[in-house]
């Protein structure tokens, strides 16, 4: 029996690389701030799909933008603290 996790996190992880690669030049010009907009749009789309499927997750533009901002800040903080661990992991491969 397979259990499929369709949480918003997994939905965003599945679609996130495509828009980021598609808008690479725009990310370079805006110094990566456009990734915040991409994450906000993905959160909003996930909320739209969640409200359509009635799974209990909805997101408006404001909450999607705040969620994207929180994800960006946490990602930046974790990348600073885990930088050495990630370097060691790359050397092992």
Image (cartoon, helix red, strand yellow):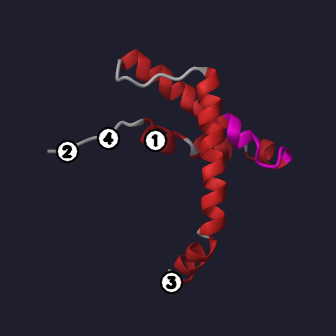
Percent x, y for residue 46? Answer: 49, 28
Q: Residues within 10 Å of mark 1 (few under 14, many from 20)?
A: few
Q: Which label lies toward us, 4 or 2?
A: 4
Query: Which residue ends up furthest to the right in the rendered image?
Result: 29
Closer to the N terminus: mark 3 or mark 4? 4
Taking the image as shown, residue 64 lies to the left or right of residue 28, namely left
**What is the CA distance from the residue labelled 1 to the residue labelled 2?**
19 Å
- Residue 2, which numbered label? 2
Q: Which label lies toward us, 3 or 1?
A: 1
Tag 3 residue: 92
Q: Is residue 33 magenta?
A: yes
Taking the image as shown, residue 70 lies to the left or right of residue 25, namely left
Do the residues bearing badges 1 and 4 touch, measured as CB atoms within 8 Å? no
Residue drawn where x is 69% and y is 42% of the image:
35
Q: Secondary structure at mark 1?
A: helix
Q: Residues within 10 Å of mark 4 (few under 14, many from 20)?
A: few
Q: Residue 49 is drawn in which quadrant?
A: top left
Q: Secondary structure at mark 3?
A: helix
Residue drawn where x is 64% and y is 58% of the image:
77
């Amino acid at each position: 029996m397979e259990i499929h996790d369709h949480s918003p996190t997994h939905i965003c992880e599945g679609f996130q690389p495509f828009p980021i690669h598609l808008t690479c030049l725009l990310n370079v010009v805006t110094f990566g701030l456009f990734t915040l907009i991409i994450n906000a749009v993905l959160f909003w789309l996930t909320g739209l799909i969640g409200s359509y499927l009635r799974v209990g997750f909805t997101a408006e533009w404001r909450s999607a933008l705040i969620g994207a901002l929180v994800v960006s800040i946490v990602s930046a903080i974790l990348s600073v603290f885990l930088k050495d661990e990630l370097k060691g992991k790359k050397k092992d491969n």
